Image (tube, grey):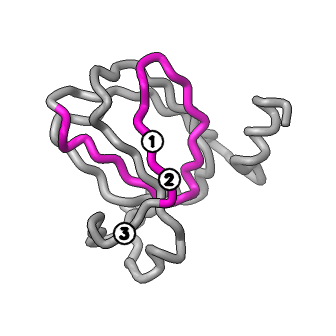
Amino acid sequence: MSKPGLYYRAHKDGLKCRISLNYTTQILDDKCITSWYSDDDLKNYLIDTLNGVSRECVGFKKNLHLPIKTMTAKPNECILFNTDIFHDWDNTQSDNYRVVLTLHLTNPGDVYFDDVKKLLFNL
């Protein structure tokens, strides 16, 4: 759940998480933007693992980086999300809560984003 006006710094979900399925349960505008950044671009940041639950870029300065991709979630979408790429989300321009149900694999083993993409989309 993202509060109105909230920004969340660049991070990778979990310590070994590579994918998630994100179900948009409440999207009331198009003002929350998710951006992805290259590892090379963010290589100089210290990483905070938040006691083993994430990989967060300490002191991330969004204005100093150019995203490699951006997206705006839409209502009633299901998104196959590559969580093994640094990403942030910016809800600072919105007056609305944004609610997304995020499902991660509990034991990802050797499962990667491209593997799941092939299974889901018969590629």
For the residues labelled 2 and 1, say whether their Cβ atoms are less than 8 Å apart.
yes
Q: x, y percentage for residue 94?
A: 19, 34
- Amino acid type, residue under disc 3 in the picture: His
Quarter occupied by residue 81:
top right
Q: Is residue 115 above or below residue 62?
A: above
Quote the CA–CA distance across marks 2 and 1.
7 Å
Look at label 2 and name its amino acid.
Lys
What residue did someone put label 1 on?
71
Asked which quadrant contains residue 92, the reply is top left
Label 1 is placed on what type of residue? Met
- Residue lying farthest to the bottom in this orientation: 44
- Give neighbour class at mark 1: few <14, some 14-19, many 20+ (Cα, 10 Å): few
User: The N terminus lies in which quarter of the figure?
Assistant: top left
Q: Which residue is mark 3?
A: 65
Vertical arrangement, residue 77 with respect to residue 102, above or below = above
User: Element type at marker 3?
Assistant: loop
Dot 3 alpha-carbon crowd within 10 angstroms: few under 14, some 14 to 19, many 20 or more: few
Kindly indicate the quadrant of the structure image that contains residue 46.
bottom left
Q: Would you say residue 77 sits in the magenta stretch?
A: yes
Residue at 76%, 30% (x, y): give it: 120
Question: How far is the residue under mark 3 from the one under mark 1?
Answer: 16 Å
